[in-house]
Image (spheres, helix red, strand yellow):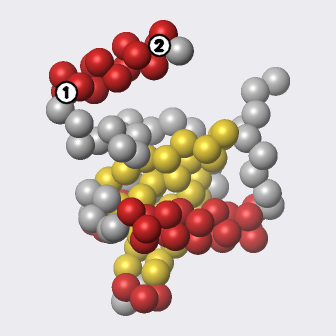
Amino acid sequence: MALPRLYFCIRTDLSEGRRAAQLIHACDIWTARYGPQNGSVIVYEVPDEKTLLGCLPKSGQTVLWREPDLKDAATAWASDAGRLGLPLLGRGHLPKKKQGWLRRLMRRA
């Protein structure tokens, strides 16, 4: 049986260090609300807060983290809703040509 997956989404207009902290906050509130997660983790990226709020899953269980140090701006969410059509963290900014190369490389692994 496949392990459950937990999906995260983070804003890329934040620094790398802040992104890591926001993902951990989202994981913390997920764990507090729904219990520990023992499966795979998938991380998506979006460019800004408006997009983050616009892509909140409409099914499944979802938690949204709002960062107090950023005037309660929404910075990350976690969900068990399943795969979404969002770019994976680190791949959203690659040119299409490089994305194809990366997909082919990942299929070989």
Spatial distance from mark 1 to mark 2, Cα to Cα? 17 Å
**Where does label 1 land, which residue?**
96
The secondary element bearing badge 2 is classed as helix
Residue at the location (28% across, 26% down)?
Answer: 99
Q: Is residue 38 visible?
A: yes
Quadrant of res 61: bottom right
Q: Badge 1, how many Cα within 10 Å: few under 14, some, many 20+? A: few
The secondary element bearing badge 1 is classed as helix
Give the left or right position of residue 93, taking residue 81 as reference: left
Give the left or right position of residue 12, taking residue 94 as reference: right
**Where does label 2 land, which residue?**
107
Residue nearest the observer in this picture, 100 or 2: 100
Q: Position of residue 21 (x, y in %)?
A: 52, 70
In this view, 62 is above or below 102:
below
Residue nearest the observer in this picture, 85 or 18: 18
Number of numbered tags placed on the structure image: 2
**Quarter in which the N terminus is drawn:** top right
Label of residue 109 in the image: none
Residue nearest the observer in this picture, 82 or 47: 47
CB atoms of marks 1 and 2 within 8 Å? no
Q: Position of residue 75 (x, y in %)?
A: 41, 70
Residue at the location (17% across, 32% down)?
Answer: 95
Residue at the location (43% across, 68% down)?
Answer: 17
Residue at the location (42% across, 58% down)?
Answer: 10
